[in-house]
Image: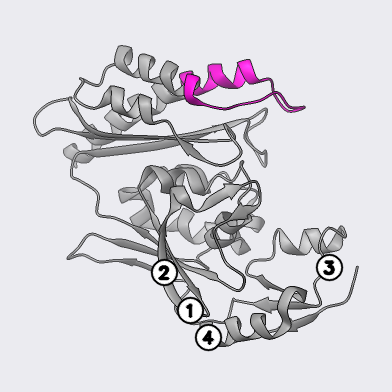
Amino acid sequence: MKKFKYLIPKTLDEAVSLHQSHGGSAMYVAGGTDVIVKITSGKLAPDYLISLKHIDGQSQLELNTETGVFCIGGLVTHRTLEMSSVIRLQYPIIHDAVQRIGSTQIRNVATIGGNLVNAVPSADGAIPLIALDARLNIYGSTGERSVDLIHFFQGPGQTVLDRGEIVTKIIVPKQSKRTGAAYQKFGRRAAMELPLIGVGVLIILEEGSNRCAKARIALGVAAPTPIRTLSAERYLVGREITEDTLNEAGKLAAEESRVRDSVRGLAWYRREMVAVLVQRMGMKCLQRIKESEGR
C-alpha cells in the first residue's frame, strides 16, 4: 500500500484550502470504510488524505420544530441514524435502509455523506432520501450551493461535485401529516449483502380518504444512478390506494426501470421484484399512516 500523509483540518475552509493546494493528489476521507479499502487494494493511491471527522457541526441531526425541516449532517454515521428516535418515529423509511447497511461495526463509522458521494448504484442511503425529496448542501471554494439529491448522481461513482467540494448537510423538507414511507432492499441473503434491487415508496393521502395526494417511487440498482419512476407516481396521484392500484403502479415502475443482466441477477427477475416491492412498500405506507394516526 502506498504511503500517504493524513491531514486533519478543523474547518470547512481549511479542508477546501488543503484540497486545492494539493490538487489531484489529495482525497477527502470521512468514515473511511470505502476509501481505505480501495487504497489497500491499490485502486486508489493518494498522496494526502484530508480527514473531515474533526470539523464541527457536521455530525448533527437537527429537527426544526417550527418549520418541520430536518437536517442531517454529512458526517452523521449510519449507526446514529439507526439509533435515533426521530428517525425511527418520523422518518422510518430512513431507518428501514440504514439498519441493514453492512455490519454494526461498519455502521459505527460509515457516514451518510460518504454513502452518497461514493455514488454506487447499490447505495441504500440514497433511495429513502430521494423519496423524501431531500436536497444537499455543498460547500467549496466558491461558497455554498444546494442541489436536489435526485440530480446529484451522474453515473456510477460520478456526481455533480466540483473538485474540492464537500457535502455538508442533507435537508429533508417538512412532511405532511398523512405521509407514509417505506424502503426494502432485496438480495440473495439478508445480512451484509449488496441489494439486487432497492425500492423506496412514499405516499401522502388526502385528508379523510385513501386517495393519493402525492407519490414518490425511487429505485436503486435499477439504472446506472438512482431513479424515480415518474409514470408510476403520476398513475397513483388522485387514485384510491389499494392493492390493485399499487399492483398497477408496480408494473409501471418495472417498465420504467433500466435493469440489466449481471452475475448477481437477471434483468427479468429484477423487474419482477420491482413490481412486487412497489406494491408491498405501498401497503406498508398505508399501514404506517394508520399507525401514526392511532398514536
Q: Which label number is shown at residue 45? A: 3
Discs 1, 2 touching: Cβ within 8 Å = yes
Q: Is residue 236 magenta?
A: no
Amino acid type assigned to the residue bearing label 4 in the image: Asp
Residue 32: image tag: none
Q: Which residue is mark 1?
A: 142
**Mark 2 belongs to which amino acid?**
Arg
Label 2 or label 4, whichever comes before in sequence order: 4
Magenta span of residues: 255-276
SS at circle 3: loop
Q: CA distance from mark 3 to mark 1?
A: 27 Å
Label 1 and label 2: CA atoms lie apart by: 9 Å
| Mark pair 2, 4: CA separation | 15 Å
Give the mark nearest the N terminus, 4 or 3: 4
Q: Which badge, 2 or 3, is on the more N-terminal residue?
A: 3
Q: CA distance from mark 4 to mark 1?
A: 10 Å
